[in-house]
Amino acid sequence: MNRVTASHVEGLGTRYGTAFTLGEHSARHLRRIFRLYLTAWEMDDLYDSASLALTELIANVVRHCPDRRGTVLFLRLPEGRGVRVEVTDESPRPPLSTAVDELSELSELAEGGRGVAIVEAVTDRWGWVPSADRPGKTVWFECEVNGERRERNGC
């Protein structure tokens, strides 16, 4: 069930969070919600790159977590600097790029494994932290208004 994690004092607030089982169409629905928030926060210019990174993180949950359960959190950075997106799942496996493996000649032909490289290319910062109290991890990224990387890569 979707839930908003902060009260709506004005407009859409500064954060949105939801926890549910992710499926094939979840990324599309979350991108629509994300667009509403970015518009309300006057950060429409971040949508293309940030939604691509969001899609990659959702795809990883769908692809790599047997139960497909996840939590998504959109946060407006202080002073309207940009946006932070966090995706939490129950897999303890770290996010790795499997397509770029120097030991395998077939890696360049792999159908998957480029998500980490895409997220790194289109965001200002990204990272992950293991969950402290249960199996799993949180993968996050930030895109900033007028960010240095965005100017180079379109974020």
Image: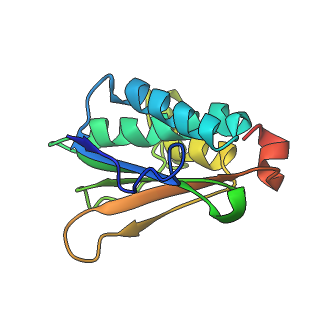
**Quick check: 13 left or right of 71?**
right
Instruction: Give the vertical position of 103 relative to 39 (above or below).
Output: below
- Look at the image and tell me in which quarter the N terminus lies: top left
Q: Please, which colouring scheme is shown?
A: rainbow
Instruction: Identify the residue at image location x=20%, y=66%.
Output: 135
* 74 in relation to 77, above or below: above
Q: Which residue lies furthest to the left in this view?
A: 67
Q: Where is residue 116 in the image (x, y as percent from the top left)?
A: 52, 47
Q: Is residue 104 left or right of residue 133?
A: right
| Residue 39 x, y percent position in the rendering | 63, 34
User: Residue at the front extreme?
Assistant: 9
Q: How many numbered badges does the structure rendering display?
A: 0
Q: Is residue 98 above or below residue 14?
A: above
Name the residue furthest bottom. Answer: 132
Tell me: 9 left or right of 143: left
- Residue 26 image offset from top left, x and y in percent: 33, 29
Question: Does residue 60 appear anywhere in the picture?
Answer: yes
Q: In which quarter of the image is the C terminus?
A: top right
Q: What residue do we see at 79% from left, 53% from top? A: 147
For the point 78% across and 51% down, the residue is 149
The structure residue drawn at horizontal position 39% and vertical position 26%, both measured from the top left corner, is: 29
> Observer-nearest residue: 42 or 74?
42
Is there any visible trace of residue 110 in the rendered image? no
Residue 83, horizontal then vertical, whole percent = 61, 52
Please state which of residues 100 and 60 is positioned toward the viewer in this rendering.
Answer: 60
